[in-house]
Image (spheres, helix red, strand yellow):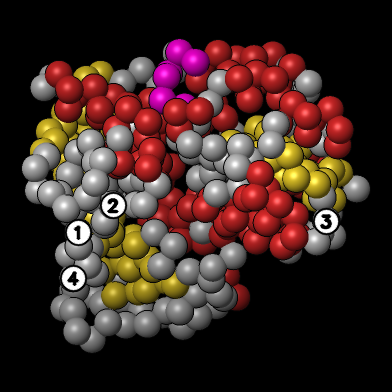
């Protein structure tokens, strides 16, 4: 049985821990590392196995893991990845993979030179709704895509500072930008504006309240993305991606639902099991509405796909290896560049 270790015992680390505890049939949990020892010790207690460490090199030396999940804040990447690569350990790294694109490219190239299996935390790609979205974009000509993600300000200190988090576009709404890349196609240029001054009741806050971005895609489609962290409650919050065609549209609420307006409801088949399909009588869509619902196993599928790839040596089922995950960060960092310069920015995803 392969040995698994975790670096970073914060909120996202706990999310992965839940998946690890459902995967003890294929991996042995041997080490948990965090610069706050109490956090690592809490993970050991919850897992009922493994050992707590404050230093990841000490952990590597003692438990010699076969794979590692790196769940650290965006600003902290670099040394951990290079040491992991030097030791030849396959790694799963949370998004965004870094804030310095030159650093991220060096990590990518070093991992590939060692032929290491890698993955990143774009778990939304493992949603069954993502599969439906891909099918929709293949079968229909999408003219434009409209996206919104509005929420509140997370509590993490590093999130509230754009220099340490990358801002909402890079650290949070990147899931939406990545989903559009994954289902519709690659972006080629962006033009973005941001605003501040609306969030006045949060301490140590230094990032954008809202941004609006226009995107041109390689296939000719256009996109408009509005994201913000200014919402005080659920009445002001929303999240959806709308793919618009000439005769229909699809609405994707990530990890919740995927609706196609303009297609008549049909009986559930074996292929569609796991989804709820129903007409929406409240909407006149010239042919009805088909709705698909998520089954909430996407996160476990994401983590186990990486684990199973390391066990088998076959990474072909990983949907977001480091190289591709980096492209989504390049996309969002280009948006930050456009905000800062006021200029349209061309995107080079293949550097």
State whether residue 110 is above or below residue 72: above
The residue beneath circle 1 is 231
Percent across and percent down for residue 168 are 30, 42
Counting every numbered tag in the picture gives 4
**Residue at the spot of label 4:** 235
Establish if 286 lies above or below 86.
below
User: Residue, x 36% and y 79% (percent of image)?
Assistant: 265
Residue 25 pos. (x, y %): 84, 60
Q: Which residues are magenta?
A: 98-103
For this rendering, which residue is in front, 200 or 303? 200
Q: Nearer the viewer, mark 2 or mark 4?
A: 2
Q: Earlier in the sequence, mark 2 or mark 3?
A: 3
Mark 4 or 3: in front is 3
Q: Write down the residue under mark 2.
A: 153
For marks 4 and 3, give the CA distance: 43 Å
Nearest to N terminus: mark 3 or mark 1: 3
């Amino acid at each position: 049985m392969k040995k698994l270790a975790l670096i970073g015992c914060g909120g996202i680390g706990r999310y992965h821990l839940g998946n690890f505890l459902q995967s003890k049939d294929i991996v042995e949990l041997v080490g948990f590392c965090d610069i706050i020892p109490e956090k690592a010790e809490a993970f050991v207690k919850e897992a009922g196995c493994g050992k707590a460490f404050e230093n990841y090199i000490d952990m590597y030396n003692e438990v010699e893991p076969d794979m590692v999940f790196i769940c650290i804040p965006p600003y902290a990447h670099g040394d951990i990845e290079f040491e992991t690569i030097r030791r030849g350990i396959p790694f799963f790294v949370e998004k965004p993979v870094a804030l310095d694109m030159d650093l991220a490219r060096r990590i990518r190239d070093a991992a590939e030179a060692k032929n290491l299996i890698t993955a990143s935390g774009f778990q939304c790609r493992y949603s069954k709704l993502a599969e439906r979205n891909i099918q929709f974009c293949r079968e229909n000509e999408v003219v434009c895509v409209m996206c919104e993600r509005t929420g509140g300000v997370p509590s993490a200190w590093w999130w509230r500072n754009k220099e340490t988090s990358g801002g909402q576009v890079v650290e949070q709404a990147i899931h939406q930008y990545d989903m559009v890349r994954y289902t519709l196609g690659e972006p080629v240029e962006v033009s973005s504006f941001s605003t501040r001054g609306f969030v006045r009741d949060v301490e140590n806050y230094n990032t954008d309240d809202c941004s609006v971005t226009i995107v041109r895609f390689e296939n000719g489609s256009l996109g408009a993305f509005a994201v913000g962290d200014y919402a005080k409650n659920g009445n002001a919050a929303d999240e959806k991606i709308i793919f618009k065609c000439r005769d229909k549209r699809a609405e994707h609420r990530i990890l919740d639902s995927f609706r196609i307006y303009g297609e008549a409801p049909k009986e559930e088949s074996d292929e569609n099991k796991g989804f709820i399909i129903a007409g929406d009588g409240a909407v006149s869509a010239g042919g009805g509405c088909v709705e698909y619902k998520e089954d909430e196993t996407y996160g476990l599928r994401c983590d186990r796909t990486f684990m199973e790839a390391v066990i088998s040596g076959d990474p072909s089922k990983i949907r977001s290896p480091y190289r591709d995950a980096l492209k989504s960060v390049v996309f969002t960092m280009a948006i930050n560049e456009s905000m800062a310069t006021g200029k349209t920015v061309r995107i080079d995803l293949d550097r």
